[in-house]
Image (tube, coloured by chain):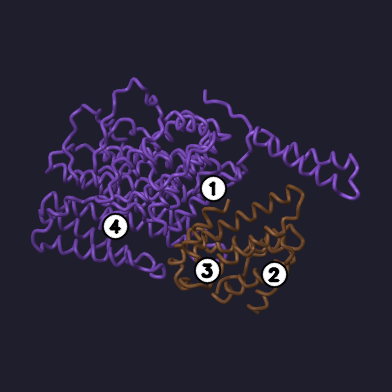
Chain colours: A purple, B brown
């Protein structure tokens, strides 16, 4: 079984390329007891994936029990470190799937208003399962590192592991890792992202906002603690994704704390590996989620949020540049996630950050050739940074829709972005003046033709409405 | 405002999320019309129709299985029971603004009947209390009475 990639909010099972498990090929030896148990566990896992909610999570539990037995047998039988690593990898994947299903079943529970208490309980259960999964990933890493000669230190997999060390700089020699280690990095990143979401769910604040809106100090404190834990998990996820994507230093600190923003004096970064698209796509989603969550944290300053959002955009851009559909990369899904995630950021981030991000985009050189999917022509300068980002998101989603016109979900996501754009839209002063004058002249013509024209005072009552139309857009303070 | 949702509905008329998006856009247009001094009833009627279309898809249309809420969770915006309840509430609000409180009551009563028929508890009275609008309050009261009569 291979894990699903991290799914940014609003997207389900769309990132096509799954994490690789190169080590699985080394296990096809004989029908040893551990192998039989592993096959049985994988079969049960496949059945669990097809189960309905009415059947609960029993099949997931059965699959995990069988895979745990396979791990024990592989350890006892001396089947080899690679075999043990494979079994632990599969068990961890299965535990992550179980954790996801626990939450889904609780969310779909019947009841007049669902079952909020059940959802919180399920989130707590999911946290325990995900921590267990992270422990097994750490064991798998240790087993395979013992044989392959890679870095045997804990790479930050365990549930309470310290942050992994800084990634090597472009010119620095890296430890041999192999495909399985990169695939495990992606899986661990997915588990950490799921852990972040489960932590927020368990605190009753899935979007990170204080559910009591400041009315209950204990709820406010619980939400703040959950946000801090979730941000730490997303930080670790970003590091392991970055390592899987080639370990470029510019992506390795998700919160941006203590890391200066990239500057022109930095050495040029090496291009990401060709097969890094899934890790980069997940990295973009992870960083964007951290930025959206950080926007609710008063302790994170706008500069940190800006750094996170810039890194998210850089990761998505890099993912696009290395995506190849022939290799199984799902470019339309990547564009969908980019567009919907960017649109969400445009709505969540403070004005100062959105203005700075919009300024970044204006500094970019124009594309040499038309974008994929017949992107619309450049629009006139937007009235605010937020609107500019929403337009950017809408264009990205239009590109995604151009790839797959039958995908209603992408059209709906674009609808959300366009609706947000329309709701927050304020006319530019020149356009407002033009429209106002046209309206005034039209009304004057109509009024003059009336058989019984209204009094001047009645006409003047129109002006408050006109002033509302002519109101200029608010100005935004720059980032210090 | 509805461009993306219309595109989604052109692809799939049974896209509940598209209908919900269109309903919310129509409701926003109704609010804007009221802010400008109009009554916004036409926009509210559009919103009610769109909400009803979305709910009819997930409540009785193809693919809806009351015994398997897991499958129903595929609709991201109406996947949870509370989402459907909220959409029904919004549909009732839109109907009241459109000048059709009786239709709102019927809409809510239908929801209540479906939940009672599925063996679920009655709608919480807080929903009735929370209806500040007099017409909407009457609609909720009528719906609750209908549900109570059904369960009795």
State which quadrant residue A141 falls in: top left
Residue A115 appears anywhere in the view: no
Q: Using residue A318 as the reference point, say whether residue B87 is left or right of it.
A: right
User: Dots 1 and 4: beta carbons under 8 Å?
Assistant: no
**Tag 3: Cα neighbours inside 10 Å, few (<14), some, or many (≥20)?**
some
Residue indicated by mark 1: A418
- Report the chain holding disc 4: A
**Rendering coords of residue A283 (x, y %):** 35, 41
Q: Name the residue under label 2.
A: B103
Q: Which chain carries label 3?
A: B
**Residue at the spot of label 3:** B57
Which callout, 4 or 3, points to the residue nearer the camera?
3
State the residue position of label 4.
A94
How far is the residue under mark 4 from the one under mark 2? 49 Å
How far is mark 4 from mark 3, CA to CA? 34 Å
Relative height, residue A349 to residue B29 (above, below): above
Under circle 2, the secondary element is helix
Question: Do marks 1 and 2 share a chain?
Answer: no
Mark 3 and mark 1 in contact (Cβ < 8 Å)?
Answer: no
In the structure shown, which secondary structural element does the residue marked by tag 4 occupy? Answer: helix
Answer yes or no: are tags 2 and 3 on the same subunit. Answer: yes
């Amino acid at each position: 079984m291979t894990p699903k990639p991290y799914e940014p909010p609003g997207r389900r099972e769309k990132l096509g390329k799954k994490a690789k498990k190169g080590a699985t090929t080394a296990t096809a030896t004989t029908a040893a007891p551990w192998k039989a148990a592993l096959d049985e566990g994988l079969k049960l896992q496949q059945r669990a994936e097809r189960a309905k909610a009415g059947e609960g999570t029993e099949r997931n539990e059965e699959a995990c029990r069988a895979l745990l037995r396979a791990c024990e047998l592989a350890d006892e039988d001396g089947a080899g470190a690679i075999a043990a690593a494979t079994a632990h990898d599969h068990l961890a994947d299965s535990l992550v799937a179980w954790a996801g299903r626990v939450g889904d079943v609780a969310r779909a529970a019947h009841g007049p208003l669902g079952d909020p208490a059940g959802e919180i309980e399920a989130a707590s259960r999911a946290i325990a399962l995900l921590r267990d999964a992270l422990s097994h990933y750490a064991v798998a890493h240790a087993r395979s590192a013992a044989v392959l000669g890679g870095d045997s230190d804990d790479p930050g997999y365990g549930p309470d592991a310290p942050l992994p060390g800084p990634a090597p700089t472009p010119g620095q020699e890296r430890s041999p890792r192999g495909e399985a280690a990169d695939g495990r990095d992606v899986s661990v990143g997915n588990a950490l992202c799921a852990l972040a979401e489960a932590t927020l769910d368990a605190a009753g604040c899935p979007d990170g906002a204080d559910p009591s809106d400041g009315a209950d100090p204990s709820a406010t404190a619980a939400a703040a603690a959950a946000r801090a834990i979730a941000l730490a998990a997303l930080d670790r996820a970003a590091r392991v994704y970055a390592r899987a994507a080639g370990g470029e230093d510019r992506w390795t600190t998700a919160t941006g704390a203590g890391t200066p923003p990239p500057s022109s004096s930095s050495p040029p970064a090496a291009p990401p590996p060709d097969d890094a698209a899934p890790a980069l796509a997940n990295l973009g989603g992870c960083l964007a989620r951290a930025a959206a969550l950080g926007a609710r944290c008063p302790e994170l300053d706008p500069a940190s949020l800006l750094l996170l959002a810039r890194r998210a955009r850089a990761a998505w851009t890099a993912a696009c540049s290395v995506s190849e559909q022939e290799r199984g990369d799902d470019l339309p899904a990547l564009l969908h996630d980019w567009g919907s995630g960017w649109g969400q950021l445009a709505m969540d981030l403070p004005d100062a950050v959105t203005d700075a991000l919009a300024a970044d985009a204006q500094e970019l050189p124009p594309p040499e050739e038309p974008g994929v999917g017949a992107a619309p022509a450049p629009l006139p300068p937007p009235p605010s940074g937020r609107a500019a980002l929403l337009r950017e998101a809408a264009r990205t989603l239009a590109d995604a829709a151009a790839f797959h016109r039958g995908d209603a979900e992408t059209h709906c996501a674009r609808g959300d972005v366009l609706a947000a754009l329309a709701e927050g839209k304020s006319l530019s002063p020149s356009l407002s003046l033009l429209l106002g004058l046209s309206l005034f002249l039209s009304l004057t013509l109509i009024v003059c033709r009336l058989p019984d024209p209204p009094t001047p005072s009645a006409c003047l009552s129109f002006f408050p409405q006109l002033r509302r139309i002519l109101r200029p857009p608010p100005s935004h303070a720059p980032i210090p | 405002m509805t461009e993306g949702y219309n595109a989604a509905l052109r692809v799939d008329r049974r896209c509940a999320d598209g209908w919900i998006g269109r309903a919310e856009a129509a409701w926003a247009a109704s609010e804007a019309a009221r802010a400008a001094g109009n009554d916004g009833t036409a926009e509210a009627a559009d919103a009610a129709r769109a909400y009803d279309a979305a709910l009819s898809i997930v409540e009785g249309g193809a693919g809806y299985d009351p015994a398997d809420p897991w499958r129903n969770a595929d609709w991201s915006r109406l996947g949870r029971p509370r989402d459907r309840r909220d959409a029904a509430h919004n549909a009732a609000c839109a109907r009241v603004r459109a000048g059709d409180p009786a239709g709102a009551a019927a809409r809510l009563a239908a929801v209540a009947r479906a939940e009672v028929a599925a063996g679920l508890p009655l709608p919480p009275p807080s929903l009735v209390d929370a209806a500040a609008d007099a017409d909407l309050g009457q609609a909720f009261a009528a719906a609750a009475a209908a549900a109570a009569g059904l369960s009795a």
